[in-house]
């Protein structure tokens, strides 16, 4: 199935099944919970640490339900395609999931997903998702689709929740642009 067809199908499913956008619990200005997690970048394991990443600039923490699922494949690909725009804003992008953890190494390097352009972190037991109020209501133990922009001072600069993957990149890039103007 083509990426365009996937996007159209997901948009329709998102409209029908998730008519209202969930509201992320962490509000703008709140302190973002610090976390460290096992992660992969281009298939290589490492430990991601939010505090360390914030030393380099703002961080986009996007939660997604599970590697190798239709919406998550689309979302990862969209972040991958836009990674140079995030880098231009001095932002680090990290995807975080509690689903299909045994597939994250491959997911992180496959061209049709992350393409080795940004890291994905394993959230065993959805502990990080719980701190960020990003739990999937329909499948307990998995994270939902919520994106946060964390400012360098560790506060939430933007939060966006929607099961459709289509607007997360635009939302976070727009928030980073607004943050840079402050």
Image (spheres, helix red, strand yellow):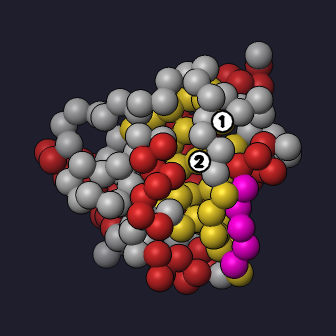
Which of pointers 1 and 2 lies earlier in the amino acid sequence? Answer: 2
**Furthest-top residue in view?**
182
Q: Along the horizontal axis of the image, is 47 left or right of 172?
A: right
The label number, if any, that marks residue 61 in the structure image: 2
Magenta segment boundaries in residue numbering: 45-49
Disc 1 packing (10 Å; few <14; some 14–19; many ≥20) = many
Q: Position of residue 139 (x, y in %)?
A: 24, 59
Q: Along the horizontal axis of the image, is 56 left or right of 6?
A: right
Q: Is residue 19 visible?
A: yes
Residue depicted at 70% across the width and 61% down the height: 48
Q: Position of residue 127 (x, y in %)?
A: 46, 55
Closer to us: 104 or 83: 104
Which type of secondary structure does the marked residue at label 1 adopt? strand
Which residue position holds label 1? 150
The label number, if any, that marks residue 126 in the structure image: none
Is residue 46 shown in magenta? yes
Q: Position of residue 84 (x, y in %)?
A: 74, 53
The N terminus sits in image quarter: bottom left
Residue depicted at 77% across the width and 29% down the height: 153
């Amino acid at each position: 199935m083509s990426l365009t067809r996937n996007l159209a199908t997901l948009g329709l499913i998102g409209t029908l099944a998730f008519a209202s956008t969930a509201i992320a619990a962490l509000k703008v200005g709140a302190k973002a919970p610090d976390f460290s997690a096992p992660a992969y970048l281009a298939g290589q394991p490492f430990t991601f640490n939010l505090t360390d990443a914030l030393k380099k600039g703002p961080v986009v923490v996007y939660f997604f339900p599970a590697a190798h699922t239709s919406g998550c494949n689309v979302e990862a690909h969209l972040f991958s395609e836009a990674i140079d725009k995030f880098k231009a804003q001095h932002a680090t992008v990290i995807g975080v999931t509690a689903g299909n953890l045994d597939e994250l190494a491959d997911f992180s390097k496959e061209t049709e997903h992350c393409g080795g352009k940004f890291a994905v972190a394993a959230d065993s037991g959805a502990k990080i998702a719980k701190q960020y109020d990003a739990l999937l209501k329909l499948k307990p133990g998995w994270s939902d689709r919520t994106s946060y922009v964390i400012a360098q001072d560790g506060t939430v600069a933007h939060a966006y929740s929607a099961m459709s993957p289509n607007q997360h990149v635009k939302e976070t890039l727009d928030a980073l642009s607004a943050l840079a103007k402050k």
